[in-house]
Image (tube, rainbow, N blue to C red):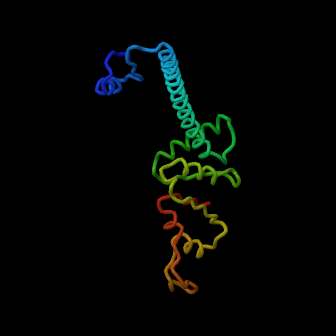
Amino acid sequence: MITARDHWEDLEAALRSGANDYLTKPVNLDTLKVRLAIAEQSVRNLDRRREAEEALRDQEETVLNLKRQLNEKSQFQDLVGKSKLMGDLYLRIRELAKVDTTVLIEGETGTGKELVARAVHFSSVRKAGPFIAINCAGLTDALLASQLFGHRKGAFTGAVDHQQGFFEAANGGTLFLD
C-alpha cells in the first residue's frame, strides 16, 4: 500500500485488511523495486506452499489406500493363489466375516482349514479378540473336556488349581477346533 499519510492507525488498518507492505510518499524507486520483488517472492512461495499442500493431501490419500490394501492382504497373508476358486474363497471369507456366527470349515488334512479360519477371524469384528487353535486329535476325551471347558481346583484328581477352558479364553475372539 502506498499512501501520503504516515499514521500508525492507517498502517494498522491496512495490515489488518491484508496489505503486505506499507509505503509513504514520496516513494524511493529503489525501495519500491525491492518491496515489489519481495511481494512477488511471497506470492511464489504461497503458490509453492499450496502446491505442496495439495501434493501432501494426494500422498496422504495414497497412503490410506495402500493401508487399506495392506490390511486386506494381511487378512489373507497365508493363503496363496489367484485362481477362480481362490477368488471365490476370498469372497466367501469376506461374507462370513460380516456375520457373527459359528462357521464349519471342512477339508482334508493339510488343505488349509486353519488358514481359512484365521482369515475369517482377522477379517471379522472379532479380530481384536484372541484366535485360539486346538488340535483335538492330540487330546484324550477326558483331557479334551478339561481343556475346552476348564475346571476348578479339586474337581478331579490332579486338579490342583483353577484352569480356564479354551471356550472362556476365546471369549470375544475365535476358537478353532481341528
Give coordinates of residue 103: x percent, y percent: 52, 52
The answer to which image quadrant residue 60 occupies is: top right
Give coordinates of residue 66: x percent, y percent: 59, 37
The residue sitting at the left extreme is 9
Left or right relative to 155: residue 26:
left
In the figure, 167 relative to 151: above or below? above
In the figure, 20 relative to 141: above or below? above
Q: At x 53% / y 76%, what residue is drawn?
A: 163
Q: At x 60% / y 75%, what residue is drawn?
A: 143
In the figure, 48 relative to 27: above or below? below
- State which quarter of the image contains the C terminus: bottom right
Q: At x 51% / y 31%, what residue is drawn?
A: 57
Left or right relative to 15: residue 173:
right
Q: Nearer the viewer, residue 96 or 43?
A: 43
Q: Nearer the viewer, residue 121 or 10?
A: 10
**Residue 89 can be seen in this image:** no
Q: At x 47% / y 50%, what residue is drawn?
A: 125
Left or right relative to 111: residue 160:
left
Q: Nearer the viewer, residue 19 or 134?
A: 19
Left or right relative to 87: residue 34:
left
**Residue 99 can be seen in this image:** yes
- State which quarter of the image contains the N terminus: top left
Give coordinates of residue 89: x percent, y percent: 60, 41
Q: Nearer the viewer, residue 45 or 19?
A: 19
